[in-house]
Amino acid sequence: MFTSLRFRLWLSYALVVTVSLLIVALVLLVFLIRNPLLSRQTQQQLRSVQSMISADPQGFVDDPARLQKLADQQHVRILVFDTSRQLLLDTGGRAASLPFPRRNVFNRASQTAVDANGAVWLYTGARLGDGRVLVVAAPRPRVPVLNVFADEFLKPIVQGGLIALLLSLILAFALSRWVADPLQQVVVAASEYPSDEVKPVELRGPQEVQTLTRAFNAMLARVQSSQQSQRDFVANVSHEMKTPLTSIQGFAQAILDDTADTPEARQRAAQIIFDESARMHRMSLDLLELARWESGTADLNMSPVEVGGLLRGIVEKFTPQAQKAGVELLVAVPDALPPLVADGDRLAQVFTNLVDNALRFTPAGGRITLSAEESRAGIKLSVADTGAGVTSEALPYLFDRFYQADSSRAGGETTALRHGAGLGLAIVKEIVQAHGGKIGVRSQVGSGTTFTIDLPLENN
């Protein structure tokens, strides 16, 4: 309890109020000790005596008896110094000697002097017409400060202090709960994670605490999303591996059991085993490559790349496959297009995946166009086909792992989303982002699909 934030906040508020009350009491005590009201009254009396003497200096200064009588009547001490600051006259008799007055420029109304015994005197002085200096002094007034303080001020100060302390403690408790309770909720949510029942923490408390809570909620959402993505990834990999493994195991068992008892059956079984193992091998390589891109460990060998030559090389590579499928491949690149600073092999991989994807979904008689043009931010490239297109429900998932669009009706009339070894577009997205670019897609069922890539001319 004593180490909790709530208790420390409460205790800090209580200490602040207590210290404030003690400072008020100390200031009041010092004020009473200095007693400025009585000091001003004494100074006024001293100036009155000084004025009386200054009005008739010869009649008072040259008549010590008259001067002594005035001092006794007014309860003051009168001193006269010559021009060389030597004491000529002092009505104090055997009282401790007072020094020659020092000029106080900044506070003339409250001039003080200390006698030989250490007592403090208030005084006022004036220079007479013949050069002598007149000083009128009186002991600084003293009152029984502690008695006055105890009798008049201590009780109301204690009463007011207790009331203020009680109110401050109540307010401190409310403020400490206002600050500490949201933090406690964050602690509870963090300690209960990774329970499925953990929910975002409600935004409460001061702005700084709300900012912390908002950051915690955002972190919680990212972690939950990442874990869900990992679970989906494992489930998808298991699903994708299960089919080829089942085929490999089944046909291998057929060979071992002599179920495939003819050369043709054994050849077919061996071919299926080979094809499925090759598919698993490609999937493993794609998974490793995707993991490198997502972890940021994949390397880019940057150099100037001539975009037209790159796209024409892709078209040349796929021409036999396109001719066999009855699909036309076109390139539209202006002559004055500036070169890109990029990894040419990785960009070739991007367009290889996109063109291969377009060929699979473009029917005979269709067309695939690779184009490039200069834009304000760099170069805009696109791969457009006249295939079946992708439904609006499938578009948001095209770049996700293990998702791909495929025809859901015979003849490829429409498309839908299905599970599959869809790693190509996920890798394409990672490569484009590693180059500082963006990739997007637009599609309409029955009209085809267009992938657009925006790349900066120079990658930093």
Image: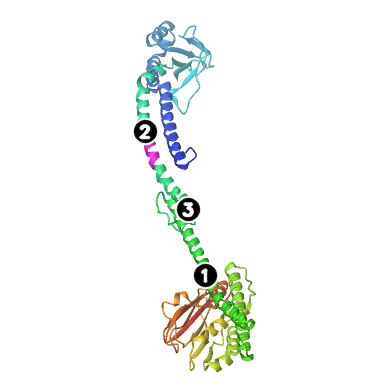
Q: Are marks 1 and 3 in contact (CB under 8 Å)?
A: no
Mark 1 or 3, nearer chain start = 3
| Residue 339 seen in this snapshot | no
10 Å neighbourhood of mark 1: few (<14), some, or many (≥20)? few
- Provide the secondary structure element on which disc 2 rests: helix
Separation of marks 3 and 2 at Cα, in angstroms: 37 Å
Is 286 located above or below residue 25 in the figure? below
Is 73 located above or below residue 452 in the figure? above
Disc 2 residue type (three-letter) = Leu
Disc 1 residue type (three-letter) = Ala
Separation of marks 1 and 3 at Cα, in angstroms: 26 Å
- Residue carrying label 3: 192
Q: Are marks 2 and 1 in contact (CB under 8 Å)?
A: no
Disc 3 residue type (three-letter) = Glu
- Outermost residue toward the top? 65
Read off the magenta span.
166-174
**Depth check, front residue: 428 or 96:** 428
User: Which image quadrant is residue 34 in?
Assistant: top left
- Provide the secondary structure element on which disc 1 rests: helix
Residue 126 picture location, percent across and down = 44, 19
The image's colour scheme reads rainbow
- Residue carrying label 2: 166
Number of the label disc, if any, that sits on residue 235: 1
Residue 292 picture location, percent across and down = 61, 70
Is 284 located above or below residue 275 in the figure? above
**Depth check, front residue: 241 or 175:** 241
Mark 3 or 2, nearer chain start = 2
Magenta-drawn stretch contains 378: no
Mark 2 or 1, nearer chain start = 2
